[in-house]
Image (tube, rainbow, N blue to C red):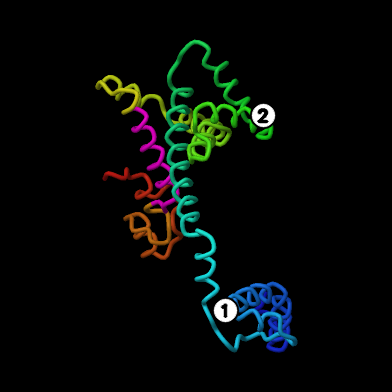
């Protein structure tokens, strides 16, 4: 669209965009510049957009007044532990509900899904009493166990169950004949799903612009149209070939 505009119209358009960007850029600029200004310069009138006396003492005072470094570290390591724990628990639970047949499987899965319907406000007092009885108050254990075994893990379990259902069961049957356990089968299906997603996201050989299969090369040399991906020899070739 901008290519069809005249030079004057293009300058007017860019000027209008710059004016409209000021309300969004100015608060960020004021916040950053105020962090390196002394207090007297922040409240001076008229205000200065560019600091005259740059000082980074405010950043040092922040970490001195409050243990922000420790708090940042706690947030990062708790988030990492919760992410890894949720993925591990949901992967195992999702595989069990998808592949392991046992009595009451669907009823138990329905009970697990009902955990998504319970508001978190209802569970605050029971959770506090439970962790108080376990002696975990003023520790990081509630911050780790509640997300891993709570509603976030329930949603992840549902997603992993649907993922394992879509994978072919014949591969598991062949691996089970060779003596694979449920742990090995779960790892096999997870790796297969990851590779399949990566294969789908990558461009197919022989059906893109860089197609080098013989049929397409001959067609280009003859000045003809390129064959569709379904007729391309490179797209029918297995990845191992």
Residue positioned 70% across, 78% down in the render: 22
Residue 179, image x, y percentages: 25, 20
Q: Is residue 124 above or below residue 51?
A: above
Residue farthest toward the left in the current orientation of the protein: 178
Q: Is residue 190 magenta?
A: yes
Quadrant location of residue 65? bottom right
Q: Is residue 231 above or below residue 210?
A: above
Report helix, strand or loop for mark 1: loop
Real-space Cα distance between discs 1 and 2?
Answer: 47 Å
Q: Is residue 25 left or right of residue 54?
A: right
Q: Main secondary structure of the magenta part?
A: helix
User: Which is nearer the eye, 76 or 206?
Assistant: 76
Residue positioned 44% across, 54% down in the render: 227
Q: Is residue 212 above or below residue 6?
A: above
Look at the image and tell me in which quarter the N terminus lies. Answer: bottom right
Please tell me how crowded label 1 is: few (under 14), some (14-19), or many (20+) other residues with Cα within 10 Å. some
Q: Which mark is residue 115?
A: none
User: Which is nearer the eye, 51 or 27?
Assistant: 51
User: Which is nearer the eye, 218 or 50?
Assistant: 50
Quadrant location of residue 186? top left
Please tell me how crowded label 2 is: few (under 14), some (14-19), or many (20+) other residues with Cα within 10 Å. few
Q: Which segment did they paint magenta?
A: 185-204
Q: Which mark is residue 118?
A: 2
Residue positioned 72% across, 89% down in the render: 8
Nearer-N-terminus badge (1/2): 1
Report helix, strand or loop for mark 2: loop
Q: Which residue is mark 1?
A: 36
Q: Is residue 150 above or below residue 110?
A: below
Residue 180, image x, y percentages: 28, 23
Residue 24, image x, y percentages: 69, 72
């Amino acid at each position: 669209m901008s290519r069809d505009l005249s030079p004057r119209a293009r300058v007017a358009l860019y000027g209008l965009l710059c004016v409209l960007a000021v309300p969004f850029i100015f608060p960020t600029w004021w916040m950053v510049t105020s962090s390196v200004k002394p207090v007297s310069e922040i409240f001076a009138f008229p205000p200065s957009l560019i600091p005259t006396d740059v000082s980074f003492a405010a950043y040092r005072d922040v970490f001195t007044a409050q243990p922000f470094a420790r708090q940042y570290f706690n947030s990062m390591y708790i988030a990492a532990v919760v992410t890894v724990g949720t993925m591990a628990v949901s992967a195992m639970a999702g595989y069990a509900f998808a592949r392991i047949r046992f009595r009451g499987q669907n009823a138990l899965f329905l009970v697990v899904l009902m955990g998504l319907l319970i508001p978190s406000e209802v569970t605050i007092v029971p959770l506090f009493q439970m962790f108080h009885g376990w002696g975990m108050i003023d520790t990081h254990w509630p911050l780790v166990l509640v997300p891993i075994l709570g509603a976030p893990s329930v949603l992840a379990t549902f997603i992993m169950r649907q993922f394992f259902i879509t994978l072919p069961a014949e591969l598991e049957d062949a691996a089970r004949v060779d003596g694979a356990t449920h742990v090995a089968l779960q790892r096999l299906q997870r790796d297969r799903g990851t590779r399949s997603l990566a294969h789908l996201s990558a461009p197919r050989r022989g059906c893109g612009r860089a197609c080098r299969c013989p049929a397409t090369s001959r067609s280009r040399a003859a000045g003809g149209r390129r064959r569709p991906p379904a007729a391309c020899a490179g797209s029918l070739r297995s990845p191992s070939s």
